[in-house]
Image (cartoon, helix red, strand yellow):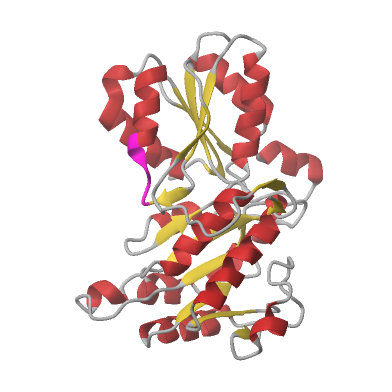
Amino acid sequence: MLLSYREALNQAMREEMRRDSRIFLIGEEVGYYQGAFKVTKGFVEEFGPQRVVDTPITEAGFTGLAIGAAMAGLQPIVELMTMNFGIVALDQIVNNAAKIRYMSGGQLSVPLVIRGPGSAAHQLGAQHSQSLEAWFCHVPGLKVVAPSTPQDAKGLLKSAIRDQNPVIFIEAQLLYGTKGEVAEGEYTIPLGQADVKRAGTDVTVVAYSKMLVVALEAAEQLSRDGLDVEVIDPRTLKPLDLDTIVDSVKKTGRLVIVEEGWRFCGLGAQIAESVYAAAFDYLDAPIVRVTGEEVPMPYSRPLEDAAIPDAPRVVAAVKSVCGAA
């Protein structure tokens, strides 16, 4: 069936909350306003205010409450109005959610999903447009997911909710309205499993979240120039499915990594290092990274566009590694 990214997320949470009464949703405006981006439309009417909890503007407070509830046997889903507000709750996420299972010797678990939109949208300013996935990936104890399609959004969110570890589930605001085919009936997508979105033989492009759209657009342009691009979506950023990426690089001999986040200490640097370690002898050219610019996100629309990777930049990167520039 054809669903929007927003509807797929709604369907995943609704199915899981019907399945397990321990699951509840908490966050700012998730109930009667139906979510800042209407992902939780109809939830308070179906599940009631005890399982769909509207909160004050206090991310550290309600994230800490959810961690305690998870330790006590419930399964909370925290909605952050934007992942940028996760910075306010970073002490709870990093020092409690990520560490409690280890520090308790496995006696306590934190089955918790923290979800919401990440990266830039359109002119939201520097404080609301950041791609922070590399921060979360750096922390042992956290799993990090960034789906690109409605099908993946639903299957991965259901798996994240069922996981017994804290999962940071990063959506993209500009993807909420995009539509795609979603399988009918019950299905999940395992965390830590990448997907080959487009098969090719000349060069591998790794991209996730809304950068996958950019990568696929670039791949279509490059096909008209005779270059056959394989596009891989990691889907789960931690744990990373390195095997799928390495297998592709061994076939193509070239790798371009596309991410919206900042270049220095970015996720692409980790992927590149891992590929160099596992497949150096198969590379016919240095790995190239296409990233966001090293600036706070500008408010000006032309400057914002210039700061975010686009298809022409990816096309140029692919041509450079293929010696076709």
Residue 220 image position (x, y, % from top left): 66, 22
Above/below status of 137 relative to 98: above
Image check: 305 left or right of 247?
right
Residue farthest right in this picture: 301
Residue 270 shown left or right of residue 312 in the figure: left
Q: Is residue 241 magenta?
A: yes
Q: Is residue 54 visible in this depiction of the protein?
A: no
Depth check, front residue: 230 or 95 = 230
Residue 195 visible to an observer of this rendering: yes
Residue farthest along the bottom direction in this orientation: 50
Residue extending furthest toward the front: 185
Counting from the top left corner in percent of width and height, residue 244 is at 38, 35
Would you say 84 lies left or right of 179 here? Answer: left
The residue sitting at 50% across, 12% down in the picture is: 322
Q: Along the line of sight, which residue is nearer the eye, 3 or 176?
A: 3
The x, y position of residue 230, in whole percent, is 51, 25
82 inside magenta stretch: no
* Residues rendered magenta in the picture: 239-243
The front one of 17 and 55 is 17
Q: Quadrant of the C terminus?
A: top right
Magenta stretch mostly in which secondary structure? loop
